[in-house]
Image (tube, rainbow, N blue to C red):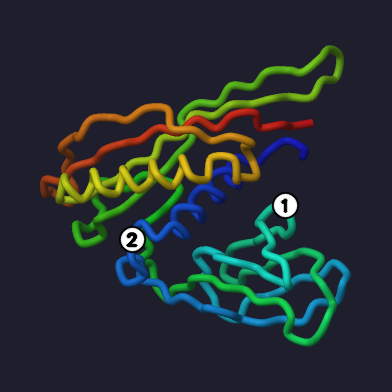
Amino acid sequence: MSHTDLTKVKEELTVFFRNSDLFTTTQRGVTTIAAETFTGTGASQVLTLAHNTVRNIRTVNDGTARTAYNDYTPSYGASTTITGTFASAGANNISVSYDYSTGTVEKIWPDYPFVETAIDSLPRIGLDIISDRTMPIGLGKPNWLSDSLISVKVYDKNTKLIDSYISTIREKILANQILFYYFPVISVKSMGPMLPIEVAKKKCFEKSIDLEGRFRFES
């Protein structure tokens, strides 16, 4: 791994939370494609997904479950692609499951909402890297290890629902803490209080859960 693009770190976490079904597909305004198929060549290839505005790739399988960033590189955008080397045994042997939308209803983002955000956009989850510490490994032209503090915030009008979403986020991180690409370990660090905020001039609430990403290796 070379120097890490921090937008990719946030992309991985955003997609993880979208795949965790913290909100329903109806709430998120997305449609799930259970299986779009492609034919593998056994060599490096680029798969272009049929639908625009892909929010999160759920699974990629060519007879073996493939993982993002390790086995393939996703590129999200107006046209989403998957770049990787896949098995060549048989036609339509690659299956991809993903969520896409045709609007901007999505409620899980790698940012925090503005106060002008419409009240009907809640509930909403935002995240950001709020601190990053990098340490050299060795002398001369060393490699580097970095740790990041990531704050995940949940916004809603209902405090009980916020606590429920926070609890689910905590459970998902604890169950998957060594399964991320950019950090060998992501752990739960701390939790913030329930705070009243104003969204579109109406009273709502926010609560944060902070995560610690450890041992991001860079060269």
Q: Residue 22: x and y, percent?
A: 36, 56
Residue at the bottom extreme, as displayed? 91
Residue under label 1 = 70
Residue under label 2 = 23
User: Toward the viewer: 114 or 9?
Assistant: 9
Three-letter residue code for mark 1 = Asn
Q: CA distance from mark 2 to mark 1?
A: 27 Å
Three-letter residue code for mark 2 = Phe
Q: Residue 216: x and y, percent?
A: 66, 32
Residue ID at (31%, 43%) = 166
Residue ID at (59%, 29%) = 214
Q: Is residue 52 above or below residue 143?
A: below
Q: Earlier in the sequence, mark 2 or mark 1?
A: 2
Q: Residue 36: x and y, percent?
A: 61, 81
Q: Few, some or many C-alpha atoms within 10 Å of disc 1 (few <14, some 14-19, many ≥20)?
A: few
Q: Quadrant of the N terminus?
A: top right
> In the figure, is residue 1 to the left or right of 191?
right
Residue at the top extreme, as displayed? 139
The answer to whether mark 2 and mark 1 are in CB contact below 8 A is no
> In the figure, is residue 1 to the left or right of 153?
right
User: Toward the viewer: 13 or 121?
Assistant: 13
